[in-house]
Image: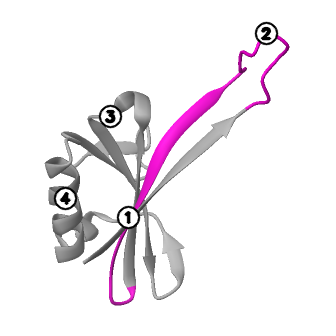
Amino acid sequence: MRIECTRHVDASEPNEDGAYDYHYEYDIYRFSSEALRLVARSYVDEADEAHFLNVEDNGSTRLLRDADLNHQLFVEAAAHLRAAGKLRLRWLSGRGDGYEPVP
């Protein structure tokens, strides 16, 4: 498994007082093996939480499916995030509120 982690900041321009209308800082994790890649995000201000966002399979991006949770790459990625202190893992299923806990 290959792991990439990049830091991102999404923020408005500061106003005259130096305050921001919005400011999000987060890490994007990319876990890959062969043609499969999983993408997860963890916000800096919620350091114990991470969300699996999608899977890239042979160049196509899609939401994760229930079966993906049993894939070896997903199991290893979840273990890596837990070892990094991300104890609350969720995945974007598109059902209900969109996110479900990782079993």
Badge 2 or badge 1: first in the primary sequence: 2
State which region is magenta. Answer: 12-35
Task: Please state which of the two labelled residues, at mark 4 or mark 1, is closer to the viewer.
Answer: 4
Q: Position of residue 84 (x, y in %)?
A: 20, 48
Dot 4 crowding, Cα within 10 Å, few <14, some 14–19, many 20+: some
Measured Cα–Cα span from mark 4 to mark 1:
18 Å
**Cα–Cα gap, marks 2 and 1:** 42 Å
Q: Nearer the viewer, mark 4 or mark 2?
A: 2
Query: Judging from the image, what secondary structure is the residue with disc 1 in?
Result: loop
How far, Cα to Cα, is label 4 from label 2? 40 Å
- Relative to 79, is 47 on the left or the right? right
In the rendered structure, find residue 17 and report the number of the disc placed on it.
2
Task: Confirm whether the magenta stretch covers residue 18.
Answer: yes
Label disc, if present, on residue 64 of the rendered structure: 1
Residue at 38%, 43% in the rendered image: 99
Q: Is residue 35 visible?
A: yes
What residue is at 53 percent from the left and 80 percent from the top? 60
